[in-house]
Image (cartoon, rainbow, N blue to C red):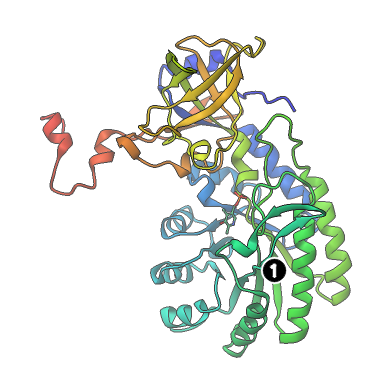
Amino acid sequence: MEKKAFVTKELVEEIVKDYPTPFHIYDERGIRENARALKEAFAWNKGYKEFFAVKATPNPFLIDILREYGCGCDCSSLTELMLSHAMGIPGEDIMFSSNDTPAEEFALAARIGATINLDDITHIDFLEKTLGYLPKTLSCRYNPGGYFSLGTDIMDNPGDAKYGFTTEQMFEGYRILKEKGVENFGIHAFLASNTVTNEYYPTLAKQLFGLAVQLKEQTGANIRFINLSGGIGIPYRPDQTPNDIRAIGDSVRKVYEEILVPAGMGDVAIYTELGRFMMGPYGHLVTRVIHQKHTHKEYLGVDACAVNLMRPAMYGAYHHITVLGREEEPCAQKYDVTGSLCENNDKFAIDRMLPRVEIGDYLVIHDTGAHGFAMGYNYNGKLKSAELLLHEDGSVQLIRRAETPRDYFATFDGFDIYGKMFPGRS
Ligand SMILES: *Cc1c(COP(=O)(O)O)cnc(C)c1O
């Protein structure tokens, strides 16, 4: 599928008068259309809820849009819990799916009424000691080990992943929790990441629904929800076919009617914790070409770097690039597109065919709406960019300002670099 930017050169030229590059910009229309489609795809399930994975895009302005479609928040850390609670999200709409969890985070999750999803059987004792009691509702994260396959395709390797309870531990854990007075149970699993196929959720659902029936039969646990978690992917590459969320919802329904309904479990709620699918395609990193270098290769030097988007450097991930204003020109030149970090892996693209670029051109780096800005760091003392929201009426709102040197130096208590550099302005 052809990948088109949701901003034009003309719009970017207007935006940079107020907000210089680089910046992340999000497309409100795309976010809304997708959230509506997800809601409709699972409308057959009475208790269905999407808990947006806050770590993907932790910005309250964006999360507020999703809330209009009934979404809650999936948190994995203290600050994500704080953000969700401060936004006024009620406890029942907050899932806490963390691992290697510090005691203070369990304590905050319990205090704000979030549903706690345990990552390990030893966390039962840890949680009980931390809180002095166990919540009435608890969920456990499942990891069957081995490989997760669709037909002959290996999708991922849960056996090598640090998360979750083994099958035996699920049964033992439920028994212990039941003995200790827990009344309502959930099952959670995240077995493959960024799947671009309509088969992942239905295959996972089949496995979890079967487990749920056994857990109920063997431990008597009252299973209230099954959390299919994240993992629905997006087509980063132009040759990939996007997932069809309606087809995914329908296939999960078939499995539900095959396995859960006959077992008398037709009232179990389906939860999801999607991050990438909710926001990924609806974010662009916009950056300007500031240098061209001709040495052993052709380089485009841009004003963004891996600090703004880490996925290419970290995973070698493909992110499509559009040169604004040159959409119709042939991709006739091969470039490495680089940032300025003192790290040779700070490249947004390697050997990428693009139209012939000139200094001053704006590049759109696609699909940065999830795990983009959020993964940023401050290496080389680089500062994080602004985040902007493109509204449906075409207006642009600043939803996070860019960092300044003052932010960067703020944690040196008692050593005021900013004040020494700019006396009178501190
Ligand atoms: C990261 C994560 C998600 C979201 O994953 P996506 O690939 O963005 O959909 C959901 N749940 C948990 C527990 C996660 O760690």
User: Which x, y percent locates residue 276?
Assistant: 61, 45
User: Is residue 183 toward the left or the right of residue 247 in the image?
Assistant: left
**The N terminus, quarter of image:** top right
User: Is residue 143 toward the left or the right of residue 298 in the image?
Assistant: right
Residue underneath mark 1: 225
Vertical relation: 36 (above or below) 134: above
User: Is residue 184 toward the left or the right of residue 369 in the image?
Assistant: right
**The C terminus, quarter of image:** top left
Amino acid type, callout 1: Phe
Can see residue 40? yes
The quarter of the picture where residue 323 lies is top right
In the rendered image, the residue lying farthest to the bottom is: 179
Residue closer to the observer: 2 or 150: 150
Q: Quadrant of ligand 1?
A: bottom right
Residue closer to the observer: 419 or 87: 419
How many labels sit on residues? 1
User: Which x, y percent locates residue 325?
Assistant: 58, 11
Can see residue 7? no
Vertical relation: 8 (above or below) 148: above
